[in-house]
Amino acid sequence: MDISTLCVHGCEKKFDTTGAVAVPIFASATFAHPGVGQSTGFDYSRSLNPTNVHLEDTIAALEEGSHAVAFSSGMAAVGALMELFAPGDHIIASDDLYGGTVRLFSHISQKNGVQVSYAAALGDIEKKITPSTKAVFLETPSNPMMRVKDISAVAAITRKYNALLIVDNTFLTPYFQKPFFLGADIVLHSGTKYLGGHNDTLAGLLVVKSDELAEKLRFIAKTTGGCLSPFDSFLIIRGIKTLAIRMERQQETALKIVRWLLEHSAVKKVYYPGLQEHPDYNVSRRQTSGFGGMISFSVRDGQTAVHILESVKIIKYAESLGGVESLITYPVLQTHADIPESERKARGIDECLLRLSVGLEASDDLIADLKQAFGNVI
Ligand SMILES: Cc1ncc(COP(=O)(O)O)c(C=O)c1O
């Protein structure tokens, strides 16, 4: 079945006998037992809820994994994921990550005795492996510099050292990238972004292929309690129905905007993996079926960046990405503000950098909005 059909229909609706086309919201915290020692399969919604199970099975099918666990946000999913590790364990992460993930690694994981080191290039990963290394964590394309990591090449290293490979697939979703086919063990999503797609709810998902990992994550989820509410689950299920068409259109518009930005004299650099001159263009072509709808670009100076942020009208100056509304973000003050300045600068995240999440508005309107926001900046 084509992925766009799977997006529309989701997995089999196991818990409905009415023929409801849309998945019902099972707004029940608890479930009655038919008898002592008996269960319908559902006891308490912190552990399992039928609406959530529909979402979990759908994302597992889309990613071609076998199990998924839903969380109240992407960060709740990262937090739960880190509970797989114990004091003394070591994780290697790609160096360009969503700032909230870095914050969690620096302030929560380190405090809990899990050491996280960062690797910029493939060669660095193997050099940083120690006997305590339990996992490699990749975000690809990365946030906000749009670097693409070679998932298969990293998987060859994690297999050799018996470590887990975790891939944050938020930016491309299974529509454009299938990390399990490339050797990942765990796929992570901020469902808040493209999966939900409407900037109206938060969600996180962890998807796995192994029963053992699924059991551990389900135990962590029910124990720590960061579960998704069935109402929000319904919104993510509804969002996924249009994922294919949104991803295609957002990418198409992104390409038009990239071309426009490249021509503007105030734009110093455009970071988009679909550009042939992008350093990771070939890896990206090989491992994905699309480049997505996220663009980062650097303008001449900080003043120009602030002018653009304060002048856009249709495009909103707001954090987040992947929704139908186009959003422009200032990583230095928003998503990556908590990263120490020296580290930020080393990654190229400075006052000139802007990140644009292309939505579903007409490309001509978005370009006209950018044109007026750039104004007389030449
Ligand atoms: C790539 C990536 N992963 C994870 C997260 C965290 O997700 P959430 O905001 O749903 O907690 C974000 C948030 O921006 C993100 O961009």
Image (tube, rainbow, N blue to C red):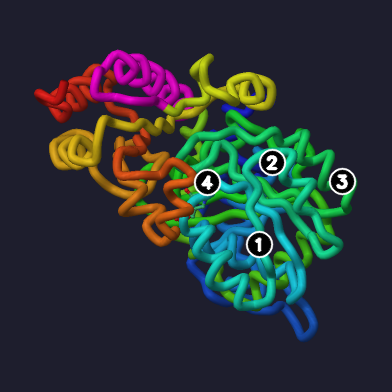
The percent coordinates of residue 145 (x first, y second) are: 47, 37
The percent coordinates of residue 242 (x first, y second) are: 46, 33
Residue annotated with mark 2: 61
User: What type is the residue that disc 4 sits on?
Assistant: Ala
The percent coordinates of residue 291 (x first, y second) are: 53, 25
- Which label lies toward us, 1 or 3? 1
Residue annotated with mark 1: 116
Quote the CA–CA distance across marks 3 and 2: 24 Å
Q: Do the residues labelled 1 and 3 touch (CB within 8 Å)?
A: no
SS of the residue under disc 3: helix
Indicate which disc, 4 or 2, sits on the residue closer to the N terminus.
4
Q: What is the residue that sits farthest to the left in this orientation? A: 376
Quote the CA–CA distance across marks 3 and 4: 44 Å
Q: Is 364 above or below relative to 247?
A: above
- Which label lies toward us, 1 or 4? 1
Q: Residue at x 60, y 33 (%)?
A: 148
Residue annotated with mark 3: 159
Q: Residue at x 41, y 44 (%)?
A: 349
User: What type is the residue that disc 3 sits on?
Assistant: Arg
Determine crowd level at label 1: few under 14, some 14-19, many 20+ residues with C-alpha closer than 10 A: many
Q: Is residue 74 magenta?
A: no
Indicate which disc, 3 or 2, sits on the residue closer to the N terminus.
2
Residue annotated with mark 4: 20
In the rendered image, the quadrant that contains the C terminus is top left
The segment highlighted magenta reads 245-270
Indicate which disc, 1 or 3, sits on the residue closer to the N terminus.
1
